[in-house]
Image (cartoon, helix red, strand yellow):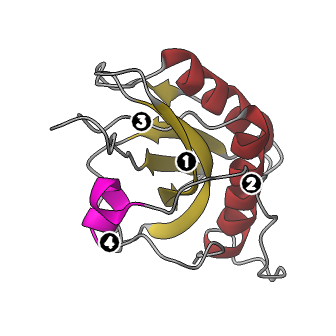
Amino acid sequence: MIRSYEPPSTTGTDTMTQVEWTQIFQSKANTLQPGDSWHLEFDENIVPDSPNPGWKQYIRNTTARFKCTKCTRSWPSNKVMVVFHMHLTNGQGIVKARPFRQNCKVCHEAPMVKPKITSENINILLENLMKKIRIKCYNENLERGDRPFRRVEVKSPHEPSHCEACILGICTKDSTFMY
C-alpha cells in the first residue's frame, strides 16, 4: 500500500501537483521489491546533506516554471533542485521530497514560490529516484547515470539571490548535479 502526505497549504502549493507526484510515484514504486510498501511525503523541513541516521539521499535538478504571487510574473528555470531522503525498514519504505523554491526578481520582498514541474519531468525525476532506491536501499548493482530531464529555453541567467537552493548552498552550476 502506498500513501501520500499533503502538507498544510503554503504559498505556491498545488495540491493537484502533489496528487500527480503521488500517482506517478505509486506506479513506479510498484515495480520495486514485491511485498514492500513505499510511500511519498513532501517535507519542507528536509535538510540537504543531513539525512537522518539510516536514511539515504538523492539530489537532482530539473526544469520547472514559477509564478509570482504578488505580480503574477512567471519564469522558467533549468536549475530547480529537488532533494529526496529515503529509508527502507522491514519492507516499509518512505521517501521524503523537497522541491526548492524561487522568488520573483522584480517584486520587492516577493515570497518564495514552489516550482510547477511538468508531468514529463516528474516522470523522469521519479524514474531516476526508483533507480537510486534500487541502488541505495536494495544494494542492486546498476549503472550510475540518470535520464536527463526535458530542458526549456531560458532567456536570463540563474539568479542565486532568488533561489532557495542557492541560498542554502546546494544549488550548482552543473546542470547534471546528482548523488
Looking at the rendered image, the quarter that the N terminus falls into is: top right
Query: Which residue in the structure is indicated by mark 1?
Result: 92
What amino acid is found at the position of numbered circle 2 in the picture? Answer: Arg
Characterize the local packing of mark 1: few (<14), some (14-19) or many (20 or more) Cα atoms within 10 angstroms.
Answer: some
Q: Give neighbour class at mark 3: few <14, some 14-19, many 20+ (Cα, 10 Å).
A: many
**How far is the residue under mark 1 from the one under mark 4?**
16 Å
Q: Earlier in the sequence, mark 1 or mark 2?
A: 1
Task: Give the structural element (helix, strand or loop) at label 4.
Answer: loop
Pointers 1 and 3 in contact (C-beta within 8 Å): no
Look at discs 1 and 2 and give the one toward the viewer. Answer: 2
Q: Is residue 93 left or right of residue 69?
A: right
Is the residue 4 above or below the residue 145 in the image?
Answer: above
As helix, strand or loop, the secondary structure at mark 3 comes to loop
Magenta-drawn segment = 159-169
Disc 3 vs disc 4: which is toward the camera? 3
Q: Secondary structure at mark 2?
A: loop
Which residue position is annotated with label 4?
Answer: 53
Residue 84 lies left or right of residue 71; in this view the side is right
Question: Tag 2: Cα neighbours inside 10 Å, few (<14), some, or many (≥20)?
Answer: some
Task: Assess whether residue 162 is covered by the magenta stretch.
Answer: yes
- Which residue bears the numbered disc 3? 114
Q: Are marks 3 and 2 in contact (CB under 8 Å)?
A: no
Q: CA distance from mark 1 to mark 3?
A: 29 Å
Residue in view at x 31 percent, y 44 percent: 44
Front-most of residues 178 and 35: 178
* In this view, the mark in front (1 or 3): 3
Query: How far apart are the alpha carbons under marks 1 and 2?
Result: 34 Å
Q: In the rendered view, tell whether residue 16 sits above or below residue 123.
A: above
Q: Is residue 152 visible?
A: yes
Label 3–label 4 contact, CB within 8 A: no
